[in-house]
Amino acid sequence: MRKGIKQLLERKVIYLAFGITFAIGYLSLTKLNIGSFGLPVAFSDKILHTVAYGVLSYFWFLTVYKKKWSKHYFSIAFVLLLLYGVLLEYLQMKLTTDRFGDFLDIVANTIGILLTAVFFKLGYFRYP
């Protein structure tokens, strides 16, 4: 059972990456009523940003790895993920009235991407 799920994930990982990308874009530009999990709102928001971009980058890096694309694509994916986070923060400032672009959100997004990149460099690319 686990092997079947793993094979399905490997074959469909690019669809998951696109789905998560669109989901984060949608959630970033719509009004959300999310609790703060008992933490200060600003702190819990940054944790959510870090986790969301960690998951997003994980699936894009996994796509690059499983499709056996050149390692240069890993760097391209890294830069595009950073730009995507900045673009969404910019669009929050310009397109929405109830959401605000924040530099600290960009920092939290970047931390999520960096942590995932380190995980991939130490794990996946070291032991193919």
Image (cartoon, grey):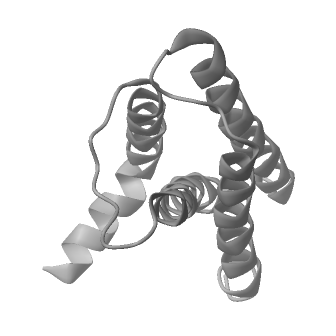
Residue furthest to the front: 40
Going by the image, does 13 lie left or right of 56? left
x, y percent for residue 46: 56, 60
Going by the image, does 119 lie left or right of 7? right
Residue furthest to the top: 95
Q: Quadrant of residue 9?
A: bottom left
Q: Is residue 47 above or below residue 11?
A: below
117 or 43: nearer the viewer: 43
x, y percent for residue 97: 49, 15
Q: Residue at x 72, y 69 (%)?
A: 117
x, y percent for residue 89: 65, 31
Q: Residue at x 58, y 23 (%)?
A: 92
Quarter holding the C terminus is bottom right
Q: Is residue 116 above or below residue 72?
A: below
Q: Residue at x 72, y 52 (%)?
A: 104
Q: Residue at x 57, y 62 (%)?
A: 50
44 or 108: nearer the viewer: 44
127 or 51: nearer the viewer: 51
How many numbered marks are there? 0
Q: Quadrant of residue 4?
A: bottom left
x, y percent for residue 41: 45, 59
Quarter holding the N terminus is bottom left
Going by the image, does 83 lie left or right of 21? right
